[in-house]
Image (cartoon, rainbow, N blue to C red):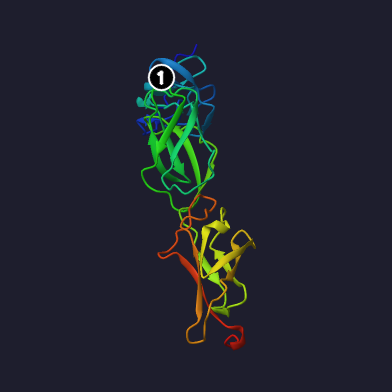
Amino acid sequence: VDTAAPTATVTLSNKDTQLPANVVPLSGTLSAALSSGEKLAFYDGDKLLGFAASVVGTSFSYDTPRLSNGAHNLRAQVVDAAGNLGPFSSVYNVTVAVVATPTARVMLNDSVSLTKNSTPTLSGSLVGRLASGEKVVIYDGGQKLGEVSPATGASSWELALASPLSDGVHALRAVVQNSQGVQGVLSAAYSLAVDTERPTLSVIGNDVGIISEAVQFTLKFSEPVTGLTATDFAVTNGALTELTPLSPTNYRVTVTPNSGLQGTPSAPATIALSLANEAVNDAAGNTYAASSPSVIATRRLIPSHLGLPV
């Protein structure tokens, strides 16, 4: 018959009073190593949780089973083979506060990949219902752009950006976030390029020509453009006879001077080429902005027998 209680005392070293996990890792020390047949028991109040599997000398560790959210009163004592109980440790009071991860998922509409609008309205859909207090948060890379709280039961959302996006490519993602700041799964990245710059134009060509000969100008836009036609030009003292695309950015314009023009080196005849405002667009929809006046090039013309200046 063994009625002698174990004498080793138990000290729990845990200090945190609130934990965001259902399993509480306990650790501490014994006043003396366990004797043969003794083991270390753990309790939540009076409920036995289990026994330590890891006791090395006078040190121990033990992970509790999954505990429910709320307050728990954890303590430990040594138990011998006959069932005699040693003294309880001091109670470790801890509150388990596990916040559930949002289960609803969010998607971004990606129908537009290039825009001239630096404050676009972003939108998307929801897979699953939002819980109370949950919202959709939108990011550009790691930078938060904004958030929106869809109506209860909504299956879609939209957000008008308050601050403009910079020109360039943006990796937009969205996620559901609950009232405790816990986020669900980020959406796939939506790549949106913003371009607010209008195309600019430079013109290449000699500034002196022969009255009786066709004149050519080479137009160089700052980026690929579309929509340019012969009707977008106006010519003073001549007529546009050919518009030739050379590349997505370069065009050649051929102009024939009007017959009967007169000119001398000191008072040459002049032809002028003008381009209409908003004649072309870039891929984002930005239009060319003509200067005022809209003349893009001039050419002084002299009779052929005088020759071009060297």
Residue at 47% x, 19% y is 49
Q: Which sits in the foreground, 189 or 62? A: 189
Q: Position of residue 60 (x, y in %)?
A: 48, 32
Residue at 48% x, 46% y is 141
Q: Which sits in the foreground, 141 or 79? A: 141
Numbered disc total: 1
Q: Is 282 above or below relative to 111?
A: below
If the image is split into quadrants, where does the C terminus sit?
bottom right
Q: Which sits in the foreground, 98 or 309? A: 309
Q: Position of residue 47 (x, y in %)?
A: 42, 15
Please identify the residue farthest to the front as the structure is shown.
260
Q: Which residue is mark 1?
A: 44
Residue at 46% x, 28% y is 156
Please identify the residue farthest to the top as the structure is shown.
1
Amino acid on which disc 1 is placed: Asp
Q: Position of residue 296 (x, y in %)?
A: 49, 67
**Looking at the rendering, which quadrant does residue 46 occupy?**
top left
